[in-house]
Amino acid sequence: MKVKRYIASTSREALRQVKEELGEDAVILSNRKIRNGVEIMALADAEMSNLVQQDTPAPSLSSLSRHYESQHDFTGAETYSKRVPDNPLQQPSLHENDSISATFARDIIAEIQAMRTTLEDQMATVAWGNFTQHRPDKVKLLRTLLDCGFSPLLTRHLIGKLSEDLDYEQSLKQAMSILTANLRTAVSDDMIERGGIYALVGPTGVGKTTTTAKLAARCVIRHGADKVALLTTDSYRIGGHEQLRIYGQLLGIPVRNIKDTEDLQLTLSELRNKHMVLIDTVGMSQRDRMVVQQMSMLRNCGMEVKRILILSATCNGKTLDEIISAYQEGGISGCIITKVDEAASLGVVLDAAIRRKLMLHYVANGQKVPEDIHAAHSRYLLHRAFKSSPKDSAFTLQDAEFALIMATKGEAETLSSMGQAIAGLAYD
């Protein structure tokens, strides 16, 4: 094991030398100030890994102790050396010696890892302090975006896109322009004008049946009841089929119940002259294996069925990511956001739509059919997201809490990405 010593005028320069010679995964053993600057003792990651490989014999205690005693003046090593008896007959056996050496090595590694974690946390704290001092307007904008519900990932990428010489208000306007350009919205009533076969998919309780009725009503107003057909695969939920049937009676549209792929294929063949066919699917958890079967039925029915994902604005970010991942495997033509009137903030769901590059067709904000559904307008939705930012919420971080969370080991990558343009967030 080769421990190397690096001396430089600053910690940053010493760390650069360590990374160049030993790599990004080098282990920092010690860091102290000296007369000429800073001294860092470092060990290559491969060298440390060799200490804990169980398939190779551990180093002898005497050699390990002598090495650390000479290199670091290790108190633990000195103490143990003094305890070794002079009488050879009283010395431990080879097996005991190896066992003690392995334990000693693990203790050293644990201490090294603790020292490394502490050093990284301290360096991240210093870096975050420098960032807040030199770019206070960007820090304020960072807080604003997080408070509005946007994810740290999107926020970091967005901050990296902003111009350096802007104050807070100017940065906020530029940020809204970038978000507006990246929130993909369909042309007003594009689904109604184009027509086709649409299946509304999504988890339970997001409003698929009501949204199906709203879209059917808009199409009836535009093209007439004889040009619209309603299908449902919801035979699991009690009253699910009857709810859509009542909407169909009010609109003058017959509703057909679909049992399997063959039934769907036959029904769609009969309805091929309709301008729009809407399929209300059964809601299920994004973790349910039946999601794959449902998507397979829609994909193998012999006709092009465009799948529209229904997302609730009241879901949290992690749940939305799970839902999108589960349904995106089968292909998604777009999405509709529901329960806008119930959400405390629109930032979370808009963030998911932007990051996952979903085409947003409509937003729904109530139970009324067909009044409570509207074409999506990116600028208006983002204005709502920033306007509804909670100020006194129990989940809003105070200044000290915000600094504590941001100045952690995991945020080192955050600060390094601030000045970089991240691919995937388009802005012209």
Image: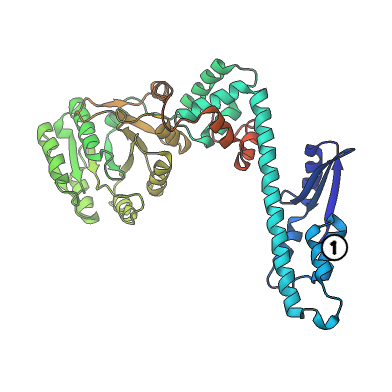
Along the viewing direction, whichever of 161 and 411 lies nearer the viewer: 411
Quarter of the figure that contains the C terminus: top right
**Up/down of 97 relative to 304, above or below:** below
Residue at screen point 80% across, 79% down: 91
Residue at screen point 80% across, 81% down: 90
**Up/down of 312 relative to 99, above or below:** above
**Residue 428 in view in this figure:** no
Residue at screen point 51% across, 28% down: 398
> Crowding near pointer 1: few (<14 within 10 Å), some, many (20+)?
some
Q: Which element is circle 1 on?
A: helix
**Up/down of 119 relative to 95, above or below:** above
- The picture places residue 139, in percent across and down from the top left corner, at 58, 26
- The picture places residue 275, in percent across and down from the top left corner, at 22, 35
Q: Is residue 336 left or right of residue 405?
A: left
* Residue type marked 1: His
> Which residue, as the protein is rendered here, is positioned at the far bottom?
89
Along the viewing direction, whichever of 229 and 324 lies nearer the viewer: 324
> Which residue, as the protein is rendered here, is positioned at the far right?
36
- The picture places residue 83, in percent across and down from the top left corner, at 81, 70
Quarter of the figure that contains the N terminus: bottom right
Along the viewing direction, whichever of 405 and 140 lies nearer the viewer: 405
Residue at screen point 66% across, 24% down: 133
Color scheme of the displayed model: rainbow
Along the viewing direction, whichever of 381 and 256 lies nearer the viewer: 381
Q: Is residue 321 left or right of residue 417?
A: left
**Residue 106 in view in this figure:** yes
Q: Which residue is mark 1?
A: 67
Q: Which quarter of the picture shows residue 262?
A: bottom left
Q: Is residue 127 left or right of residue 324?
A: right
- The picture places residue 399, in percent across and down from the top left corner, at 54, 27
Q: Which quarter of the picture shows residue 394?
A: top left
Q: Is residue 246 left or right of residue 103?
A: left
